[in-house]
Image (spheres, rainbow, N blue to C red):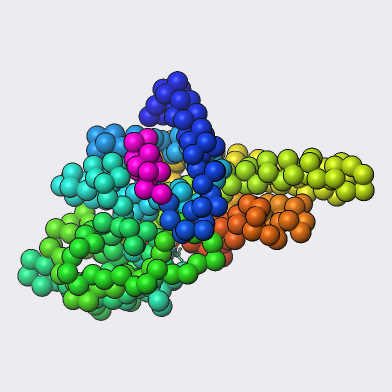
Amino acid sequence: MALDQNTLHQLLETASRFVRERLVPLEDEVAENDAIPADIVAEMREMGLFGYALPQEYGGLGLSMEEEVRLAFELGQTSPAFRSAFGTNNGIGGQGLVMDGTDEQKQRYLPRLASGEIVSAFALTEPDAGSDAASLRTSARRDGHNYVLNGTKRYITNAPEAGLFTVFARTDPDSTDARGVSAFLVEADTPGLSLGRPDKKMGQRGAHTCDVIFDDCRVPADALLGGVEGQGFRTAMKTLDRGRIHIGAVSVGVAERLIRDSLRYAMERHQFGKPIAEFQLIQAMLADSKTEAYAARCMVLDAARRRDAGENVSTEAGCCKMFATEMVGRVADRAVQIYGGAGYISDYSAERFYRDVRLFRIYEGTTQIQQLVIARNMIREAQA
Ligand code: COS
């Protein structure tokens, strides 16, 4: 545990109040404008939210995985776009640097990530390399004291806001698999780096993705993460293992919010002369959602504790990501069903959350990739 119980309790309380009093009232506005107000981003910075999972020595809060998931349970209780604003710095955008960066690279970037001065993004996916991430084609050719990057990255979360990209590119042109992939820290204003138009997404408005294009983009040799070629894919996988537990925790938070909202609605809405919450078919939906969200909460906490204890949690991370994201999809579907006609109308939050949570089953590894990771690990362990 990085924090004493009192400090952790205070942090969770503050986050919960921030969500209830500041973020929930802004959900519709953010969805409408596709932007998070600047004063809210400033408050997030002041609260330390851009660096909760980054080491204290670089200005972060240095939360353990268990503390982080407990924070994510709170932060998940509102539109996922809010969490996305600082999520990449703590997660896929910042953890490669924390895990594998050189001291100099950490010194240069982590304090600015932790303070929220810059936003980071994780540039792995390409037009032709999604689930098969190791087949990526973006190249990084060594040229004297530089590398020259060429290629296109796709659906990159926070790219429009990012000041720093962790870019995965092939340094060994003769390779076609994971071994030839290296990671680079590329600043957004590097000549040769440009952005595509923001993507028009199904949901999570207020969080932005777009293409990142590298056209003879020249970076100094010390932009190579960790100073070692060929380690990039491993860095990406380790980062995603961690991120998958986090997404599981956010899914639990959203599910708990949806359950609370649909329970309240069911108790207020009258049909056939009584609140619909008194009908057993509505009760069955509420009970199923409650049970599944509770199971996911327990799972996520267990995986986080195991990771804190130093266990390899690649399998458990996959289990959490798969179960919790599928769970919140079912919970959102039941929420719409309980709201009935109102659930299909955008005046009620169920409709928005239904679209927002769909992404959880796709990014940071689809459900099908989690199944593959879990089963492959099971077979490997059985053979050992
Ligand atoms: N931690 C550390 N290293 C890992 C790892 C992990 N969790 N998973 C794999 N590796 C290492 C392997 O040990 C292997 O290294 P060695 O050759 O030195 O042993 C290397 O990485 C390649 O692994 P593997 O052979 O398993 O790679 P595959 O090409 O078969 O792909 C999957 C593995 C499918 C699991 C991977 O491509 C993946 O996770 N895809 C989904 C990508 C994703 O989540 N995209 C979302 C983008 S971010 S929003």
Judging depth in this view, the residue of 254 and 144 nearest the camera is 254
Nearest the viewer among 319 and 384 is 319
In the rendered structure, does residue 53 fall within the stretch colored magenta? yes
Q: Is residue 159 visible?
A: yes
Identify the magenta region: 37-54
Residue at (60%, 41%) from the top-left corner?
297
User: Number of labelled discs?
Assistant: 0
Q: Is residue 172 left or right of residue 14?
A: left
Compared to 158, does 267 lie above or below? above
Locate residue 160: give its quadrant: bottom left
Q: Position of residue 231 (x, y in %)?
A: 28, 60
Percent x, y of residue 346: 64, 58
**Drawn side of residue 3 relative to residue 231, left or right:** right
Ligand 1 rendered quadrant = bottom left
Evaluate whether residue 295 shows in this view: no
In the image, is residue 6 part of the stretch drawn in magenta? Answer: no
Q: Residue at x 92, y 44 (%)?
A: 273
Of residues 383 and 36, the one drawn nearer to the viewer in this rendering: 36
Identity of the residue drawn at 54% across and 62% down: 203
Asked if residue 300 lies left or right of residue 181, the reply is right
Residue that lies at the very extreme toward the right in this rendered image: 272
- Residue extending farthest to the top is 6
Q: Residue at x 88, y 48 (%)?
A: 271
* Residue 278 quadrant: top right
The image position of residue 216, as x and y in percent, is: 18, 76
Magenta stretch mostly in which secondary structure? Answer: helix
Residue 146 image position (x, y, % from top left) = 11, 67
Using the image as rendered, state which of residue 81 and residue 164 is in the foreground: 81
Q: Is residue 40 above or below residue 365?
A: above
Q: Quadrant of the N terminus?
A: top left
Looking at the image, the residue that sits furthest to the left is 144
